[in-house]
Image (spheres, rainbow, N blue to C red):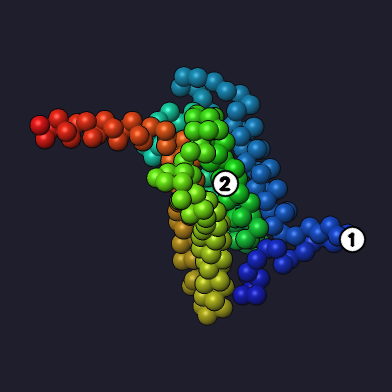
Amino acid sequence: MNIEDLSPDDAVLLQWKFISLNYTIVYTWLVMVLLVGIAWWSTRKLSSGRSISRWQNFLEIVVGTINKQIQEVSQEDSAGYLPFIGTLFLFIATSNLLAVVPGFHSPTSSLSTTTALALCVLVAVPFYAISKQGVVGYLKQYLQPTPLMLPFNLIGELSRTLALAVRLFGNMMSGAKIAAILLAIAPLFFPILMNALGLLTGLIQAYIFAVLALVYIASASQAHHRPEANAQSETTESKNVS
């Protein structure tokens, strides 16, 4: 990779009038097709017991691990969160891991992709919260602890979405830039080291993005339990004092 080629948005493969096809679009669809293909291949002959295929066993381990992490972080049933959080993690992780393949430009090194993923989280937060506590219950969160906090709560909602997009883009872009610099300095030694670090940091960044998205969604969905929890805590403390 050249140092100048930091974003796959700049590499246009096809231009027709106002429609352009760049690396971001091409490799995003490639990752989606790959994930769908693996899911189809692994589940086309589902079986139970000891005679399951290696691909089905591998997929069950992946889904089971994600499911367990969601339960530990959210402290509630993971069935509702698993499709969205699992899809986010698998897409980001696959995109980051494929970045070690020569010629592949990870879509997550594009600010447009990370912004789109963050906007999905921004939409998912009210979707999950309203489905659990209704429109009025969700909107009341923005008036806590006092209605004067409404503009600050709205700014906080937007700023954390921006931070979510910039964090993933910055980490992936800086990793690609450092790799390009090191490859220019020592092309025979650093490729192995950078590929190993790329695999590790790619998984870590996918995990951080998915966990932050889950924390935002679970926090908004469980907000209606906070007054009851606080009241119970105050009651328990008053009994202990008496």
Question: Which residue lies at the image location 39% right of the left edge and 40% below the top edge?
Answer: 73
**Contact between labelled residues 2 and 1, with CB atoms less than 8 Å apart:** no
Question: Which residue lies at the image location 46% right of the left edge and 19% below the top edge?
Answer: 49
Q: Residues within 10 Å of mark 2 (few under 14, many from 20)?
A: many
Q: Tell which of 48 and 66 is nearer to you.
A: 66
The spot of residue 164 in percent (x, y) is 52, 55
| Mark identifier at residue 122 | 2
Q: Quadrant of the N terminus?
A: bottom right
Name the residue at the left extreme. Answer: 242
- Disc nearer the start of the sequence (1/2): 1
Residue 110 in the figure: left or right of residue 148? right
Q: Residues within 10 Å of mark 1 (few under 14, many from 20)?
A: few
Is 52 placed above or below 104 here?
above
The spot of residue 198 in percent (x, y) is 50, 60
Residue 179 in the figure: left or right of residue 75? right
Q: Amino acid at mark 1?
A: Lys
Mark 1 highlights which residue? 17
Name the residue at the bottom extreme. Answer: 185
Question: Which residue lies at the image location 46% right of the left edge and 41% below the top edge?
Answer: 141
| Mark identifier at residue 65 | none
